[in-house]
Amino acid sequence: MECQNQTEAGSQQQEKPLLITSSLLGLPPYVLDPQDLPNSFDPFPGKVGSQFRQVDEDTLVKYGPKVSLAEAEAMDYISRHTSIKCPKVLGAYVLDGRGHIIMSFEHGKSLDEFWENASEKEREVVIEQMQRYMSEMRNIKGDYVGGFNRSPCVAGEFQWDFYHSDHKYGPYPDEFGFNEGVVEALSRASPGPHSTDPESREYNVRYATRQLVHSLRNHEIVFTHGDLNIGNILVQDDMTVVILDWYTAGFYPAYWEWYKATWHGVFQPSFIRQIERFIPPYWIEANIMNQIFNKILG
C-alpha cells in the first residue's frame, strides 16, 4: 500500500508539475526567480501573452503563459541544421504554467529601419541572405501540419475563439485536415448554434466558405517561420540578418509563409516586390486566406 501511495503521489506530481523542461533541449542552465519577471501589460490578454526582459547585456528572456517549449525547440533546430541566424537558445522551461526561453540578445536594426538608409548594394546583401535562408528552410519537409515537434497550430486564425477555451487546433496529418481546422476555427469564432436548414442563407454561406477553404490543396508541407514581418527581421552591423520570434514556427502548406508575411500589409507599398524575391508568392491562396481571416474577425 505504501508503494501504491507513492506511485499515486508521483502521478499527481506529473499531472501538475512545477517545472517542465524539453526532452530535446535538456535542463536549462538556471531557472530565473519569478519575482524578477513581473507581469507586464498585455494588449491581447489570452492571445500571445509574452513579455521580454534583458537578463544582462547579451541575454534576453521571453516569458509568459503562451510561451512554449516548441518555440525554443524550433529555434534550436534551425540553428543546428541551417545557416539561418536566430537567437541562440540557452535554456527553456515552463514554471507554474508560464513558459520561459533564455536566449542570446541580438543587437541590430529592424529591417524597415535599415532599409530606409541602406544603399542598393547593402539591400542586395540582405535580400541574398533572405533568399538563402528561405531556400534552406523550405527544403525541410514535413509529414504533418502544425507547430514544431508536432505541437498544435499557432496563428491568429486559431486564436479568435468566441468561447475563450484552450481548444487545440492540430497537429493535422495533412493539408485536408488543416483546412478542416480552419473551417472549425471559423465556426468557433462566432457563437452558436448555427442553422442546419439547407435553405437558409447562413447554412449556404458556411457551405461556400468551406468549399473555398478546401480549394487550397496539393501544396507541399514545408518548415515555416509564420511571421516574417519587418519587425522580426534584424540586420546587424556586419550585415548579418537575424530572424527573430519563432513563436508560430512549424510545418505548414507552402503558401502559408507568403500569406503570413503579407496579409497585414508592408511598411512600404513597393516592399512586397522585395518579399516576392525571397518568399515564393502565392497570390491566389493569400487572397483566399485574407477573406477567411476577415470572416474570423467579423
Image (spheres, rainbow, N blue to C red):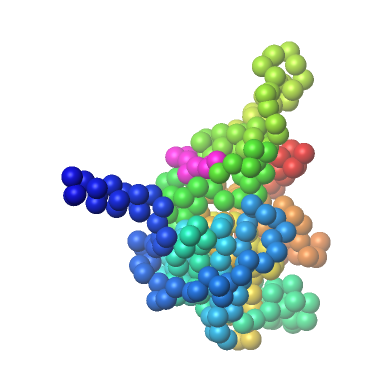
- Choose between 15 and 56: the one closer to the eye: 15
In this rendering, the answer to whether 295 lies above or below 262 is above
Q: Main secondary structure of the magenta part?
A: loop
129 over 202 or under it: above or below = below
Residue 142 location, x and y as percent? 44, 50
Above or below for 125 versus 225: below
Q: Position of residue 154 (x, y in %)?
A: 57, 51
Along the line of sight, the residue nearer the viewer: 224 or 120: 224
Q: Which residues are magenta?
A: 167-174
Q: Position of residue 43 (x, y in %)?
A: 72, 59
- Which quarter of the rendering shows the C terminus? top right
Q: Identify the residue shown where x is 64% and y is 29%.
A: 210
Residue 124 on the magenta segment: no
Question: Which residue of the protein is positioned furthest toward the front in this rendering?
Answer: 2
Is residue 171 located in the magenta-colored stretch of the structure? Answer: yes
Residue 203 shows up from this direction: yes
Left or right relative to 289: residue 246: left
In the rendered view of the protein, which quadrant contains the N terminus? Answer: top left
Residue 125 visible to the viewer:
no
